[in-house]
Image (cartoon, rainbow, N blue to C red):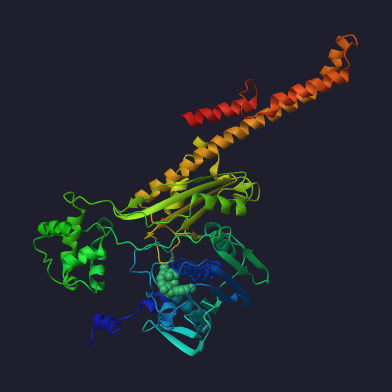
Amino acid sequence: MASETDKIFSEFKEHSVAEFFKKNRQMLGFSGKVRSLTTIVHEYVTNSLDACEEAGMLPDITVEIKELDKEKYWVRCSDNGPGIPQKHLGKALGMMLAGTKFHRYVQQRGQQGIGASGNTMFSQVTTGKPVKFESYYDKKKVAGELAVDFKQNRPVITNETVEETDGSRHGLVVEGEFAEVKYDRSSFSVFEYIKRTALVNPHAMIALVEPTGERLTFPRSIETIPPRPRQIRPHPLGIGTNDLMEFARAERESRKTSSFLQATFSRMSAAKTDELAQMCPEVDFEKSPKNLTWDDCEKITKAIHSDQVKWIAPETDAIVPIGQPQIEKSLQSILAPQFMAVTERKPKIYRGGVPFVVEAALAWGGNAGKKAVSGYNSDIMRFANRAPLLFDAGGCAITEAVKSVEWKRYGIKDFENEQITVLVNMSSVHVPYTGAGKQAIATEDEIMDEVKNAVMEAARDLQRYLHGVTRDRVRVERKKAIMRYVTQLAADLAELSGGKIKAEELEKKLLHLIENKYSNAIEEDDSGDGNIEEEISSQEEEVNE
Ligand SMILES: Nc1ncnc2c1ncn2[C@@H]1O[C@H](COP(=O)(O)OP(=O)(O)OP(=O)(O)O)[C@@H](O)[C@H]1O
Ligand SMILES: [Mg+2]
């Protein structure tokens, strides 16, 4: 007789990663209609930017969106990158966890190999249709339709055509139909996403054709291609047991564990492997890395992290930040603020071995901040490797670090309601995202501290500026007050002189005196009474606390 338990286990089945993400599409960012559309564009645009940068090309990207039906849209993204070779096209766009970036330690926007195939999946599950592609690569145009076989996590290509070309056109075009999505211009929209992408990628030309037919072009503000991302080897201190297992499984060349360790990690010399071998006598460093067990990897990782072994610090020059002048130029062209401060900081390390660089900028006044019903709200713009993070702000290291700044110390009394934009970009060979949707950075201590320090550095400049603005305001107020009495005073003095001096002449002289006194407003120090003065001194007290 079959027991209840037997019945349960008769249902036992395997499923592929594609089936998993089909069922859990929210993990890839496909939740909510506006967000889903932004996710689609985000995946295509980040791929285009990565591909152009890797190939050393200035990106020209066009995103077109048309409304087909209620909550059903057509999306097309085309770029002038290198395109994808025919033999990799299927896997690149239709197989989950496949791509050129996962096993590399290189600063790029994509990491996992699920972005493009996630879009293909979303098109299929919401409209039942495949996506269409055109790849212009190496004097060939390959076009066709592509779907994911969810059971196998394999691409299915149909209607494929191949044409010879003269090679003048290169790049990738992907288009598809997507339902359960919505276009608008809200702060989580494709529009905002593209605007922010343009802000931190001043070397890219990005055009967005909205469903209304309106074409918005964000032109390049600089003509220099950012340095190509350089691949580095991971530092031993940045890895855990599981990482070591994965590297060992993926190893193709080294026959011995000792040579595998030296080939895989930076700062791992022959002497260091000997040191580790001595510390782990139970592990055979002569055996193939493929035969390393979890136990072996755990012992090696423990030895790596022990205080006995001294490591040279990780390489940090593979990290390419946006750069202070580029951020200033972009902020100027997009937000035209009254004041901005941008910090440039040295690379730092998190988890003991992963290098990263934080850039922070503050923009105040102009078009900074977010318009609210009454006045403005502050705006925190988060970026990782120059890709905007629009969602999941709550659990992100950047939001938490910015909110932990004591803004009052910097002359910002009510940060939430100030017309201020805080921009933070974290660049790294590995960004510790909190989920596969890549929208929030994990709250690692080192990252939180560095973001906070970078923002505070910019805040100090803003504080100095605001101090000057307040002083100027005092002078303007005082000048206005004095001006109110000038005519009367001139008339009274003229009368006192018994008509010897004319009132008009006196008035002219007085005006001249006042102009002189208040023209060089900022340099001079003024003293006197009044509410505004009190305001300044109370601010100074806060700052000097
Ligand atoms: N526009 C493009 N031009 C050239 N190659 C591309 C383009 N789009 C995708 N690819 C290739 O397809 C692969 C898969 O892309 P996909 O977006 O699925 O993953 P990824 O970018 O590697 O990582 P992530 O899942 O984090 O986005 C990429 O690694 C890249 O090799
Ligand atoms: Mg990608």
Report if residue 188 is visible in the image.
no
Q: Name the outermost residue toward the left.
A: 281
Going 75% across and 21% down the picture, which residue do you hit?
513
Count of marks overlaid on the render? 0
The percent position of residue 112, horizontal first and vertical second, equals 38, 69
Out of 545 and 236, give the one closest to the viewer: 236
The image quadrant in which ligand 1 is located = bottom left
Going 18% across and 57% down the picture, which residue do you hit?
302
452 vs 73, left or right, is left
Going 57% across and 76% down the picture, which residue do you hit?
76
Out of 480 and 545, give the one closest to the viewer: 480
Report if residue 106 is visible in the image.
yes
- 367 over 155 or under it: above or below: above
372 vs 12, left or right, is right
Q: Residue 248's quadrant in the figure?
A: bottom left
Q: Name the outermost residue toward the right.
A: 499
Give the quarter of the figure containing the N terminus: bottom left
The percent position of residue 145, horizontal first and vertical second, equals 50, 85
The percent position of residue 324, horizontal first and vertical second, equals 50, 49
The percent position of residue 469, horizontal first and vertical second, equals 62, 35
Going 50% across and 31% down the picture, which residue do you hit?
542
- 80 over 517 or under it: above or below: below
